[in-house]
Image (cartoon, grey):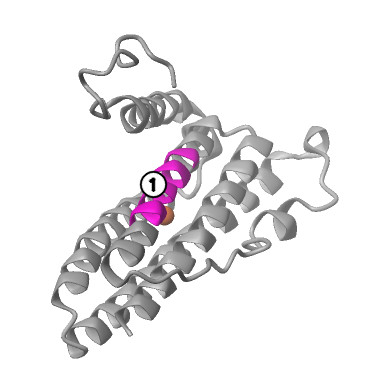
């Protein structure tokens, strides 16, 4: 029971990874690199969490459950199909930006609702440890949803002003490149005393 509930979270992460990949594609396409790297950071961070959920299922329940892999998240194709970025004009870029952020916010809202319902199922089944594990995940989703919701409020406050949006791209780019670096490089060595440890790349 607990394993099947956690698999639903795992599978939602697989879709989240697709959603962030497609959002990154959209923002690269319309030349908003800061928002593109923001989504690449979320992609990498959530892929890391997906691996943790899958590992938790194996180590806790000792069974193997296969992932359901989505073919796409239905974000980039509806927005960019048949578009040539050389022909994109200001109003169209603004419209794509708005739709992409609305998809992002909706995705995180739906995810939070799903995980909260699944957490209730876990506690109802007496799965206290799994409930606590999901509690930490819910905290992350709430933080991400707060982040994107605050951004939406800011966009609305300046009425999606494209010069303002363009001007902040370098700051976002720098911030999320830094956070990506932290995911990759702030890991502890696995075998500290290993002959392979010092300067090893693999
Ligand atoms: Fe996310």
What span is colored magenta in the figure? 40-52
Residue on which disc 1 sits: 48
Q: Quadrant of the C terminus?
A: top left
The quarter holding residue 10 reads bottom left
Q: Is residue 91 left or right of residue 125?
A: right
Please report the residue visible at 64 percent of the width from the left and 59 percent of the height from the top: 75
Classify the position of ligand 1 by quadrant: top left, top right, bottom left or bottom right: bottom left
Residue 47 shown in magenta:
yes
The quarter holding residue 6 reads bottom left
| Location of residue 23 in the rendering, given as x and y in whole percent from the top left corner | 57, 49
| Location of residue 200 in the rendering, given as x and y in whole percent from the top left corner | 38, 14
Camera sees residue 152: no
Q: Which element is circle 1 on?
A: helix
Camera sees residue 118: yes
Please report the residue visible at 73 percent of the width from the left and 60 percent of the height from the top: 78
Please report the residue visible at 16 percent of the width from the left and 86 percent of the height from the top: 126
| Location of residue 194 in the rendering, given as x and y in whole percent from the top left corner | 27, 18
**Is 159 rendered above or below residue 106?**
above
Residue 189 shown in magenta:
no
Q: Is residue 105 left or right of residue 80?
A: left
**Residue at the extreme bottom:** 124
């Amino acid at each position: 029971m607990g394993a099947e509930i956690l698999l639903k979270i795992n599978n939602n992460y697989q879709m989240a990874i697709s959603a962030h990949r497609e959002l990154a594609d959209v923002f690269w396409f319309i030349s908003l690199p800061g928002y593109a790297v923001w989504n690449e950071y979320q992609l990498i961070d959530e892929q890391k969490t997906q691996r943790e959920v899958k590992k938790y299922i194996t180590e806790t329940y000792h069974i193997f459950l296969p992932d359901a892999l989505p073919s796409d998240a239905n974000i980039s194709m509806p927005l960019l199909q048949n578009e040539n970025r050389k022909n994109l004009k200001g109003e169209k870029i603004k419209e794509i930006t708005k739709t992409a952020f609305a998809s992002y916010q909706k995705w995180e809202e739906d995810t939070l609702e799903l995980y909260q319902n699944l957490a209730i199922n876990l506690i109802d089944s007496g799965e206290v440890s799994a409930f606590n594990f999901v509690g930490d995940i819910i905290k992350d989703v709430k933080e991400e949803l707060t982040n994107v919701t605050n951004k939406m409020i800011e966009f609305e406050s300046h009425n999606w002003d494209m010069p303002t949006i363009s001007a902040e791209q370098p700051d976002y780019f720098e911030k999320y490149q830094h956070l990506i670096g932290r995911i990759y490089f702030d890991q502890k060595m696995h075998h500290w005393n290993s002959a392979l440890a010092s300067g090893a790349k693999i």
